[in-house]
Amino acid sequence: MAEQRGSLLGGLGVSTAEETTYRALLGTGPTTLSALAERAQVSTEALRRMVPNLEELGLVSRLPGRPLRLTATPPSVAVDALAARRQDEVASSRAAASVLMAEEAIHSAERPEELLEVVTGGEAIARRFYQLHEAAQHEVLGLVKPPFAIDIAQPNVTQEAAMRRGVSVRCIYAPSAFDLPAMMANVQRAMGKGEVVRIAEIPTKLTVIDAKFALLPLTSHDVSVESALVVHSSALLDALISLFEALWRTAAPMDLSTSDPGAARPDDLEREMVSLLASGMQDEAVARQLGVSARTLQRRLQVLFDQLDSRTRFQAGFRAATQLQQRADANE
């Protein structure tokens, strides 16, 4: 029989019945609708009607397979995300998170399989992605490459809100990400808000929040994202963070300091062109960023290669970077 407890999440828009069901699910772990209905003391039909709202609130997720099974979102993610939507309730919601985490901790040691969550469906993955950003308090790390579960034509306002709260954001973008026309404008906007960006070839997409949670694709599908894995604090999460840091050390910094490429001085344009090409970005994306046609870019590249006596982008990038540094040193 479920215990009668005072409401903790009412200030965050969670009804008494929803909170009772959520707390019951925390106590049981992943379970079927009928088993959860019995523990929460509600009818199976009432619980079935409640599930969509519980998912919308970010309190539960569906596990793949049949029969339908539900798993509870960890309080440290679910409550923080709800609190971020209602800033005037932050103080009380933090207290609620502490109580719920204490309840969940009693059972978590017995359920090591819950260190991994499978999220299925593009909408559910996008919802979890934004939810994790809403819960971020210290640092977000990202590996960014297609395909995307979110609409990259729109700015990531949840990340922007996190940066306003003082959260630091570092992201490595694959050159292929800039084949999408909207990506460059979004990256420029994000950098203006505080995101630190580098470019490199990367093996997978990845989002790490506060070194506590990671979200990454479950499969290496190149067309769409239909399933994702949420990794909780574990040796696997430590390995994913180490992977990010190793890639970060060798990735090329993204230099978009020239706000008006068409009005840039020759050295500015040369520096930006070399930086973008050396990072591995495709010619079409570089041309869009510089505000020139593909034909103009090819002509300027040929001139640059001739001036630097180079046959490859790597040679040109290295020699141009050396010359630009020598000029900067001479002007100091």
Image (cartoon, rainbow, N blue to C red):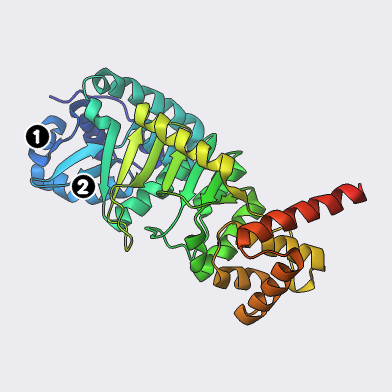
Q: Position of residue 86 (x, y in %)?
A: 48, 43
Between residue 198 and residue 230, name the one nearer to us.
198
Q: CA distance from mark 2 to mark 1?
A: 15 Å
In the picture, measured across the screen, residue 205 lies left or right of residue 167, that is left
Between residue 318 and residue 57, name the one nearer to us.
318
Counting residues from the N terminus, which is met first, the one under dot 2 or under dot 1? Answer: 1
What residue is at 17 percent from the left and 50 percent from the top?
A: 49
Q: Quadrant of the N terminus?
A: top left
Q: Secondary structure at mark 1?
A: helix
- Pointer 2 local density, CA inside 10 Å: few below 14, some 14–19, many at least 20: some
In the picture, measured across the screen, residue 86 lies left or right of residue 115, that is right
Q: Quadrant of residue 148?
A: bottom left
Q: Position of residue 200 (x, y in %)?
A: 53, 51
From the image, tell me which residue sits under label 1.
35
Query: Closer to the camera: disc 2 or disc 1?
Result: 1
Disc sitting over residue 50 in the figure: 2
Q: Secondary structure at mark 2?
A: helix
What residue is at 83 percent from the left and 50 percent from the top?
A: 326
Badge 1 amino acid: Ala
2 and 1 marks in contact (CB < 8 Å): no
